[in-house]
Amino acid sequence: MEQVTTQASEPYVIEMLHITKEFPGIKANDDITLQLKRGEIHALLGENGAGKSTLMSVLFGMYQPEAGEIRKDGKVVQIKDPNVATELGIGMVHQHFKLVECFTVLDNIILGIEPNTLGFLKKADARAKVLELSKHYGLQVDPDAKVEDISVGMQQRTEILKMLFRDNEILIFDEPTAVLTPQEITELMQIMNNLKKEGKSILFISHKLNEIMEVADRCTVLRKGKYIGTVNIADTTKEELSRMMVGRNVNFHVQKEEAKIGEAVLKVRNMTVASKVHKNNAVKHVSFDVHAGEILCIAGIDGNGQTELVHGITGLEPLVSGSITMCGMDISKTSIRKRSVMGMSHIPEDRHKHGLVLDYTLEDNLILQRYFTPEFTNKAGFLRRKNIRSYANRLIEQYDIRSGQGPITLARSMSGGNQQKAIVAREIDKNPELLVAVQPTRGLDVGAIEYIHSQLVAQRDAGKAVLLISLELDEVMDVPDRILVMYEGEIVGELDPKNTTQEELGLYMAGAKKDEVTVE
């Protein structure tokens, strides 16, 4: 294991020395040292809540540390806010994007450094630069689209272009692949390597060990806010990194028995859902069943109608036509609450927009769909706070949800991975008949992924129906009993994960095998 040094011979472009950052009830960074060489890709690895995002937020000027110092090119710098970071050439793509939803892509990219003459906005030059950057780096975006109307993957691209537009030389990527498709991840890895060749220095926060092994030069590991070590990627293995990260061996493959398939719990017939982004329908005459005792996965490249499909099933969007039946009852026009009470759980794609009330406490978020039941509300209509607290404490312990102040922590202040664990805990603990899980392990570390996958299998084995929507090829191949592939709003293939390959799956996802299959 490489020891931390501060020798002058090392050409460090950024040094974070003995950084300590505290929040109420938690020491997020406890005496951490991180050193970034010029022109390297340096990975930062750790469990959810290990302090990775906090450390990078200190570097970007969003937080001020209680102790320690930051040096750029050997000189001590005071980064009081993100504007100072930008002046120093430091850019950051945040895990939860910092975009104005009602603005266009172009307006978001130039926000804060708008080109103008005598106070009059000049967008033509900026637009040309954005289009050139997007073409050069393979980050195709529509500069005139409103952010609220584009996919999460497109928002990610907008954030990266925002950083490149400012000509930053030190680039921080906080979980950049959490919302990308396999193809987009491959492209991003290439982009990062190209940036490195151009002399840019990259700090890359990730939970995905395969990506770190593929793209990083060195890796620093944190655990529970403490520095564990820095290793050269060429000298380590995925297993060793996972041991450093979680302190134990991790099983990378899902353990499950043969499925015992029961009756159809969910029946979707000729479902059509409109698109918010363009005039065509996003989901076109889709039909399928999800049975008790099975995990059915909808796979596909992001933006092929999966989001709208889930919104139609869960009641977030009305249907243009078609029908949805759950447990024998037509729920096509039923309210979201009624669907929930009838036994549908939903782990949503966008945890901030549809999963949490960020300014509520953790405990209140955990009872969002059940607060009106006798367990949590008395006959006079008042909340049973004692019951809520003990319920929250049970889920916090069971799902290892880490937060500074336990059940009274504001959801907004928790790490993305722990926000995700809270949603997963709430939805699975409802003991649903149908669990709709969209990207359930997005942004989670290997230990948490192992646990969530085991919970999905446990739901299946308890005779529940699980509808999994995933962009992770490993997850698509490993977790479900059956795979349906979506392409341009239609189901184009049905595959058995035991009898298919990632290559064949990829061909279906790209639409190459669309005409060769008929789905019952």
Image (cartoon, rainbow, N blue to C red):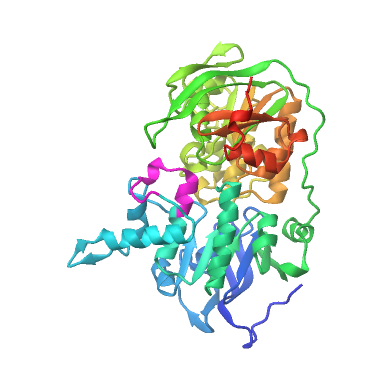
Q: Do we see residue 198 in this rendering? A: yes
Residue at screen point 52% across, 25% down = 313
Q: Quadrant of residue 318?
A: top left
Span shown in magenta: 142-157
Residue at screen point 77% across, 34% down = 499
Residue situated in front as seen by the camera: 519 or 361? 519
Going by the picture, which residue comes out furthest to the bottom?
A: 8
Quadrant assignment for the C terminus: top right
Vertically, is 228 above or below 446? below
* Image location of residue 249, percent across then percent down: 81, 53
150 relative to 5 in the view: left or right? left
Q: Quadrant of residue 375?
A: top right
**Does residue 149 show up magenta in the picture?**
yes
Residue at screen point 55% across, 45% down = 408
298 relative to 125 in the view: left or right? right
Residue situated in front as seen by the camera: 9 or 144? 144
Q: Do we see residue 415 in this rendering? A: no
Residue situated in front as seen by the camera: 189 or 317? 189
* Image location of residue 47, percent across then percent down: 67, 55
Callout count: 0
Q: Quadrant of residue 248?
A: bottom right
* Image location of residue 388, percent across then percent down: 58, 34
485 relative to 132 in the view: left or right? right
Going by the picture, which residue comes out furthest to the front?
A: 515
